[in-house]
Image (spheres, rainbow, N blue to C red):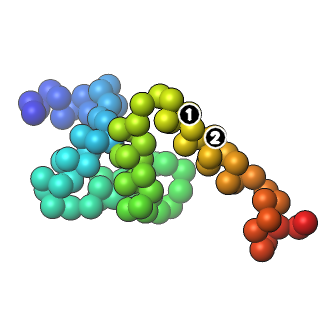
Amino acid sequence: MTFQQVQKYERGANRISSSRLQRIADTLNVPVSTFFTDAGNGVDEPLSESALTIAVQYENLDERDRTAVRALIDALSQPGRGRPDSQE
């Protein structure tokens, strides 16, 4: 990787895929969350390791499967779905 490529990543001119980020973390023997300690994602804490793993796995899906996963998440996250905290 060249200095110019690093600069582009730092400025956000180029994006890095989650699978490549996972490979970099594996190579460096660090968790992927290491790269998100101050990402400005609107929350005070980085994503959990399991959330990052899911994101990497999601990137490896084809579009049909991604659509199915989004539909499943939408269905499971609906309020009042019968969870103990619901107001049914």
Residue designated by label 2: 71
Q: Which mark is residue 67?
A: 1
Which quarter of the rendered picture does the C terminus lie within?
bottom right
| Residue type indicated by callout 1 | Thr
What type is the residue that disc 2 sits on?
Answer: Ala
User: In the rendering, at what x and y percent does residue 79 appear?
Assistant: 79, 56
- Helix or strand or loop: what does disc 2 sit on? helix
Dot 2 surroundings within 10 Å: few (below 14), some, or many (20 or more)?
Answer: few
Q: Within the image, what quadrant is residue 7 found in?
A: top left
Distance of label 2 from label 1 (alpha carbons): 6 Å
Q: Mark 2 near mark 1, Cβ–Cβ under 8 Å?
A: yes
Please count the marks in the image: 2
Give coordinates of residue 37: x percent, y percent: 36, 58
**What is the residue that sits farthest to the bottom in this orientation?**
84
Taking the spot 9% from the left edge, 30% from the top edge, the residue there is: 2
Asked if residue 51 lies left or right of residue 69, the reply is left
Q: Is residue 74 left or right of residue 62?
A: right
Left or right: 22 as drawn, with respect to 42: left
Q: Find residue 3 and report its image quarter.
A: top left
